[in-house]
Image (cartoon, grey):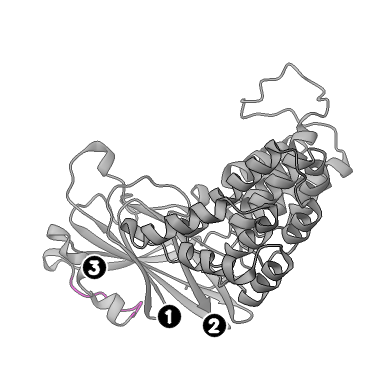
Amino acid sequence: MRRYCLASMILVVAASTVPAAELAALYKQIREVGPNAANSGPAAAAWRELRAQPASAILPTLVAMDGASPLAANWLRSAVDAIVEREMKAKKPLPVSDLEAFLKDRKHSVVGRRQAFELICQADPAAKARLLPTFLDDPNLELRYEAVETAFDNIRKLPKPNPEADPEKEKLETLPANPATVAELQRLLAASRHFNQTAEIARELKGYGVTIDLTEHFGYVKKWKVLAAFDNTDEKGYHTAYPPEVKLDPAATPPGKNGEATKWVTVDSKESLATVDLNKPEVVGKLKNAVAYAFAEIDVPAEREVELRVASSTGTKIFLNGKEIFAAQTYHQSFSPDTHVAPCKLKAGKNVILLKVCQNDQKEPWAQDWKFQLRVCDSTGMRVPLKEVTP
């Protein structure tokens, strides 16, 4: 969680007409609110006092959201809403120039900057068209999405040679090449971080004769070695450290479930978003109460912070270079991209990713999926340049 800048908050508070110490005390009470109504009494009292403050408290309250918990940020946001509503009813102006300066400072919280943008547009509707283009590379993914979507809508409004064509058809008529339009679409594709939005832009590019490999674009790992199967009766295998997670040896084939032999299978996924379906007979086959391991080796040119984002419909653990970095013992949730996110640091050179994917014994038709997909990206969801070196 990002820490708030106390010096920055004090500076803004001091510039307001409300005593700095008074506001700082209110923020402290609200920021200490916790789950299950912890400290909610003092926080509620502080919130009531804060929402009664004048417009000069708006900016320091936005700054106070830096590093606040989601719950505390929500309290602070609602206090700002109350102040703004009262000021607008009194036909008093909002501090738009100060809000724009706050918005441009990307070190501030996602919640605070989003609210600042909304307040600016509320006070000056014309500001939206002016500000949105500046968000194409913004770390605030909500602002980025809206910026991309607005620009993309402008392209979709361009006349098509065949306006009667069904936009839902898979086969699109190739439109005349327009370098400027294609370049803009590619710029928006690079900016987008939302799966559906990205897929729609790729589809539009296809209509202009440009094919995008979304598996590559999102940074999915395609090459794996899979070892199976080990026992997961009563879901105990999830907590059992089988040989691959004790010492990974691609040449070893330790005894598995019911003493049966295990074997390594090489997988180079050609499925959408590099999904590896363990139920396929050429991978593992349909098994219940089973554990499979999959490892991949990747090479990066320099040490860097990344996120390993995994989709898995069953119990999953992630190991990086021999260390467990993520665990989720959930079975048969929806299989959707980025279900699990594991922030971590890759070292320069070769890195080994090991997945443990567990299947239980549920019999329902919807509980038969046993598959995974994994991608390597930065905190915004942008793929990280890497080389797959899995033997």
Position of residue 198 in the picture relative to residue 263 (left or right): right
**Of the residues under marks 2 and 1, which one precedes in the sequence?**
1
Magenta-colored segment: predominant secondary structure: loop
Q: Which residue is mark 2?
A: 347
When asked about the image quadrant of residue 198, the answer is top right
Pair 1/3: label in front: 1
Instruction: Please name the amino acid that badge 2 sits on.
Output: Lys
Pair 3/2: label in front: 2
Q: Which residue is pictured at 57% across the width and 46% down the height? A: 195
Q: Which residue is mark 1?
A: 321
Q: Which residue is mark 3?
A: 262
When asked about the image quadrant of residue 289, the answer is bottom left
In the depicted structure, whether residue 10 falls above or below residue 212: below
Disc 3/disc 2 C-alpha distance (Å): 31 Å
Instruction: Please name the amino acid that badge 1 sits on.
Output: Asn
Q: Position of residue 245 (x, y in %)?
A: 30, 76
